[in-house]
Image (spheres, rainbow, N blue to C red):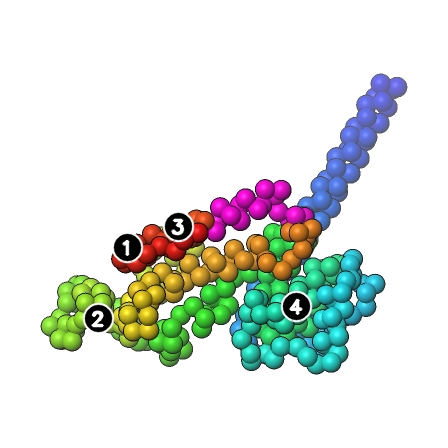
Amino acid sequence: KISVYRKMRLLFLLLCCTVAFSCCKAVEEKETNDAYYSLWEAQKFLLEIVWHVQEPVALPECQDVEFVNDAVQYTKFDSDMQRFVQDVQHQCLLPRNDFFSAVVRTHHQQVLGLYKLLTYAKDWTLFKQNVCWARTHINPGMFVYALNLAIRRRKDCEIFELPPIYEIFPQHFFNSEVIHRAMTVSKKKMEMAQKQTHANNGTVSERSLHDWQTWQWWKLMGLSDQHWYLDTEGSVAKRDGLTKYWTPVDYTRDVYILNDETRLSYLLEDVDWNANWYEFNLNFPPFLEDEELGAHHHKRSAERWIYEVRTIMTRYNLERLSQGMKPIAD
């Protein structure tokens, strides 16, 4: 009887342990799922906050949000932040319709204050509130620049990203012709252009070449510079299930008109080239103190900066040589 009793107690103990373990595992899984959901919501918010950034914000949580200027709510509150608060109170902010440049002294003073107000916010809730306020009241270029800087330096934003700058401000990276095509495009026209291309089997009609110029490379392919074409061969589009379109664009037509530098328009107006330069300056902002830069970069970051600048200049000088131009001296 004693042996049976002990076995029953042992069995009951094992059953309790199993139930407890299952409950702990369920709680752990729930906490993990909640954490993933919170991260997903945060990333979704950052993507939506820069969507059509030059238009009024449409997010419900960003309506009628007030600016937080209480120094207690920040881990640090220095003179740059105080100056920005004064600019807000005196309504001296850069107008929303003006062009922003981080190399303009008055612009970078304001963006530095805004960046610190976003970066030194004590928690995500305050950070989000400041972002919502800035989205409505701050110049779009300044807002995106400060937000990009902040999410690179806040520990709770390290895994988040914003869209490429040419997706946020396409008008600064594409010429007016491309922007106009994108604004007036219709799915029906794209389908018709695709059918016409397939019908011609890639052959070039005599009509399309009657006014052909040497820089019109797309006409030799039987394409029109007035249409968008569906990318059916792109591996990225197939892998991610995207619908990808492309259109011919030329940046070498009017060379030599303004000055000799326009020979390099194919490089200087390249979208990825300019986006890379924007990202580079976000990683090494010229107006941040050494202490702040050192806290977010490797101790040999200065060497990395020199290396990247030299790489860019080497490529630029190679392109100059290819066009019969003298390289720029170091």
Give the residue pinned by disc 1.
Answer: 322
Which residue is more in the foreground, 273 or 128? 273
- Specify the quadrant of the image occupied by residue 326: bottom left
Q: Does the magenta segment cover residue 306?
A: yes
The residue mark sitting in front, 1 or 2, is: 1
* Dominant secondary-structure state across the stretch colored magenta: helix
Residue 247 showing in the rendered view: no
Q: Residues within 10 Å of mark 2 (few under 14, many from 20)?
A: some
- Look at label 4 and name its amino acid: Gln
Which residue, given by chain and number where applicable, does mark 3 sit on? 314
Asked if the residue at tag 1 contacts the one at tag 3, i.e. Cβ–Cβ closer than 8 Å, the answer is no
Disc 2 designates what residue?
196
> Residue placed at 75% from the left, 37% from the top?
21
The Cα atoms of the two marked residues, 4 and 1, are separated by: 40 Å
Which picture quadrant has residue 152? bottom right
Residue displayed at 30% across by 64% down: 263
Q: Which residues are magenta?
A: 294-309
Between discs 3 and 2, the one toward the N terminus: 2
Q: Earlier in the sequence, mark 1 or mark 2?
A: 2
